[in-house]
Amino acid sequence: MIVKQFFDEPLAQYGYAIISEGEMAVIDPGRDERPYLELAEALGAHIIASCLTHPHADFVSSYWAIAQKTGAKVYASALIGLQVPYIGLQDGDEIKVGKVKLKAYLTPGHSPDSMTYVLYDEEGKEYAAFTGDWLFIGDVGRADLRSKAGNIRKQQEEQARDMYRSLRSMFKLLKDTTLVYPAHGAGTLCGKALKQFNASTIGVERIDNWAVILAHQTDEETFVQALVTGQPHIPKYFPNSVEVNRAGPKGYMEALQSIPRLGKLTADSARTMDRNFLIVDARPAHLFRKGHLRGAFNIPLSKSFNTWLGTLIGPQEPYYLIVSSEAAYETAIHQILSIGYEATLRGVFIGVEYAEESGPEIFPNPELLRQDGQSYTVVDVRSSEEAAVSRPVAHSINIDLAELRERLQEVPKNKPIAVHCAGGYRSAIGSSILLAAGYSSVYDIGEGVLQLT
C-alpha cells in the first residue's frame, strides 16, 4: 500500500492518492489532474475511485476530470447532490482499492455533507483518516460557509453543533495511532488556528487540538460560541466554488486553453478593451506605481494572489489580467484555475508598454502621520482583530481590505489618504482600490508601517 500526499501551496491544499495491487483511489484532488494521472502511469496503476470529502469552497477539484479520463467512479456523500454521475455514500459504506479499503463516515460540522474516509490496510488495521475540512491539524473547519451554498444549507450555529457531536462521536471510534490526513494546512481560510504540519495522529489531536479538547471538556453551547468567534473573512469566491465543484469542473488543460492571451499591453490594445470590465494588475507594486491603466487594481502576484483576487472580485465580475512576464503568467493562471476564476477572465496581457497614470506614491515620512492627526486620513486595511491588538496610528480608520470596495463611502475625500496594513502587501492593494475609485491624493505607507510598530 502506498499513500501519496499532494500539496498546492497558495491555498495550503492537500490531495491524496492511495495505491494497492495496481488500483488507485484519489481523495480531494486539486484542480490540476495531471500529477495524479502521472503518478498512476508511473506506478502502472488504474484509478478506480475519485472521492470528495465535501464540495470544497476554497478550491476547485479535478475529481470529475479524473473520472472522465480514467473511468473511475465518483464517490461522495449521498447528501452532497453532485450534478454528475456519482455513488452517494451512506455512513459506514466501503470502497475497496486492491487489498485495502476506505470506510466512509458522515462527519458534519464544516459541511453538512462532509465524509471522512478511514483507510484500513491489507491486514484490516485502521491506518489513516482522510478528514477533509472536518478535522485539521490543531483545529477544525469553520462552520459558517454553508448558509448560502450547497445542496444542504445550514446556519453557522447549527453547523457548529454538528461539529461538536461529530468530534465526540468520531474520537470515540478512531484509534489514537490512526494518522490524520486533512485537506488543508496552515494558511487556509477554512479554519482559524491550523498548525504548520501536514499530518498528525488522532492521539496527538486528542491532546493538542483546541477544538477537540473543548468538545470533550465543555458543553455544546460553549463550544459553539468558541467555534464561530474569530474566524477569518469569507472570500467572495467561496460560495461559487461549492457550486462549481457540485457541477463537475472542467479539466485543467481544457480550462487553460479557454483563456485568451492578448499579448503586450499597448496603446492600441488598451483602446480595444471593454472598460466596463475590471482590470487586475498583478505586477509588483513598484512597477504598478510607475505606470498603469486608469481604474486598475494592483493585486501583486504572491502566494496569496488567488485568495485576494477571489476576495475582492466577485465570481460574476468580468476582468482583465495584466502580468509582467511569461513566468508570471504561468503562476497567476495556475492560481486562477485553482479557484475556478477562468470563466470571467476576458483576457491576459503579458508585459506592459503603455500606461495612463502613476501612483499611489509611497508615503515619505510615516512618523509624521502619528504626530499630525489633522492633515491626513489614515486607512488601516488590516482585519478588525489585528486592529484591536495594535493601532500604529491612533486616529486611523479601520476597514478590512476584504470589505474596502463595499465601504468606500466611509473614507472622506477632503484630505490626502495614507493606507497601511502590517507589512505593505495589503496596503498596496488597498491604495490602488482607492485610486481606482477616484480618490485623487492617495499614498501607500508600505513597509514604512514597520517604523510605527
Image (cartoon, rainbow, N blue to C red):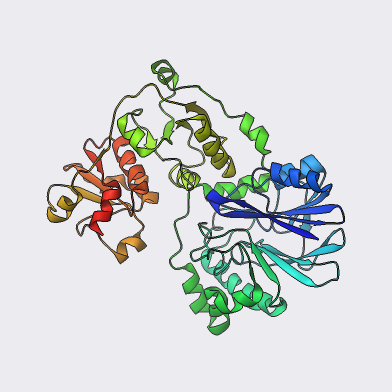
Residue farthest along the front direction in this orientation: 42
Residue 83 appears in the figure: no
Q: How many marks?
A: 0
Residue farthest along the bottom direction in this orientation: 217
Q: Which x, y percent locates residue 390? A: 28, 63
Of the pair 108 and 51, the residue shown nearer to us:
51
Look at the picture and state if 356 lies above or below 60. above
Q: Is residue 408 left or right of residue 58?
A: left
Look at the picture and state if 390 lies above or below 434. below
Task: Give me the residue at 64% from left, 77% from top.
Answer: 203
Task: Give me the residue at 29% from left, 37% from top.
Answer: 435
Q: Is residue 164 left or right of residue 438?
A: right
Look at the picture and state if 17 lies above or below 174. above
Task: Give me the residue at 81% from left, 43% from top.
Answer: 70
Q: For the N terminus, give its image quadrant.
A: bottom right
Q: Which x, y percent locates residue 272? A: 44, 18
Of the pair 83 and 446, the residue shown nearer to us:
446
Q: For the C terminus, give its image quadrant.
A: bottom left
Q: Which x, y percent locates residue 166? A: 64, 73
